[in-house]
Structure formats: C-alpha cells, structure tokens
C-alpha cells in the first residue's frame, strides 16, 4: 500500500518502506516505477526477516558502517539492504527472479 506523507522526510529523501507501507514525499512519486521498485525490494527484505529483525539489522549495520566510513551518507549507501535495492531498482523484474535473502551477497563491499 502506498501512502503520501511529506513531513516525514529529511533532505533529499523521497520514499521509504515501513512494512507493509511504501511512504512517499509527494503523490507524483507514485508514478516513479524505479523508486517504487526500490521500496518494494525493501518490503521483500522486511518480510523475509520477519520485519523487526530487518530494522534491528539495518540499524546495527548502519552504525557499524558509520564507524568504518565516518560519513553518514556513505554508511547509508553501503548498508547491504540499500546496496541490493539501489543496484537492482531499475530492473523491474528483479523481484520475480530474486532468491531468498538476496541482500546477503551485498553484505561485503565491492573491492576496487
């Protein structure tokens, strides 16, 4: 279910998933198929981790990554759940072929 609530968002953030809702900053974003797919990937992650453990792991990983990078935005972008969602958001068929716990392969950052 998609809900619009513009007062919830910080800076440039426009959407978030909070089981079972996708919450958007403005109604026009309902047409952004890539954004909706990104948030649907998060809903799948939340469901397979039974919701509460997802939020606990997300927070824990965010804290650990902050102490790795000392940069909140870089830490956020490197959380495994976000890496999976960002790297696959444009593939609108991703969820149909995604295996269980697909975020696990994004846990370790890529080597450069």
Image: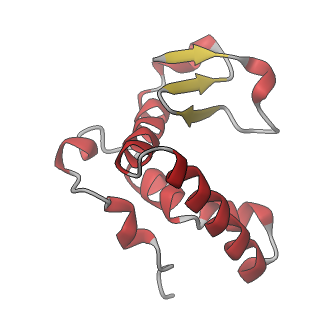
Horizontal and vertical percent position of residue 93: 23, 40
What's the residue at 26%, 46% (across, down)?
94
Q: Quadrant of residue 33?
A: top left
What's the residue at 41%, 36% (across, down)?
40
Q: Quadrant of residue 79?
A: bottom right
* Side (left or right) of 65 relative to 50: right
Horizontal and vertical percent position of residue 82: 53, 56
What's the residue at 73%, 69% (across, down)?
63
Horizontal and vertical percent position of residue 41: 40, 43
* Side (left or right) of 48 relative to 110: left
In the displayed orientation, state which residue is furthest to the top. Answer: 27
Seen in the picture, residue 82 relative to 22 is either above or below; the reply is below
What is the number of callouts on the image? 0
Quadrant containing the N terminus in the rendered view? top left
Work out whether residue 47 or residue 66 is closer to the camera in this orientation and state it: 47
Seen in the picture, residue 81 relative to 89 is either above or below; the reply is below
Horizontal and vertical percent position of residue 39: 48, 37
Q: How is the image coloured?
A: secondary structure
What's the residue at 70%, 17% (across, down)?
5
* Side (left or right) of 26 relative to 11: left
Seen in the picture, residue 16 relative to 90 is either above or below; the reply is above
Work out whether residue 19 or residue 99 is closer to the camera in this orientation and state it: 19
In the displayed orientation, state which residue is furthest to the left. Answer: 97
């Amino acid at each position: 279910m998609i809900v619009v609530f513009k007062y919830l968002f910080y800076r440039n953030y426009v959407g978030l998933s909070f089981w079972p809702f996708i919450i958007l900053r403005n109604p026009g974003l309902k047409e952004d198929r890539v954004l909706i797919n990104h948030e649907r990937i998060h809903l799948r992650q939340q469901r397979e981790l039974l919701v509460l453990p997802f939020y606990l792991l997300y927070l824990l990983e965010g804290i650990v990554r902050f102490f790795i990078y000392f940069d909140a935005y870089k830490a956020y972008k490197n959380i495994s759940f976000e890496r999976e969602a960002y790297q696959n958001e444009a593939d609108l068929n991703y969820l149909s072929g995604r295996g269980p716990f697909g975020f696990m392969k994004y846990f370790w950052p890529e080597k450069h």
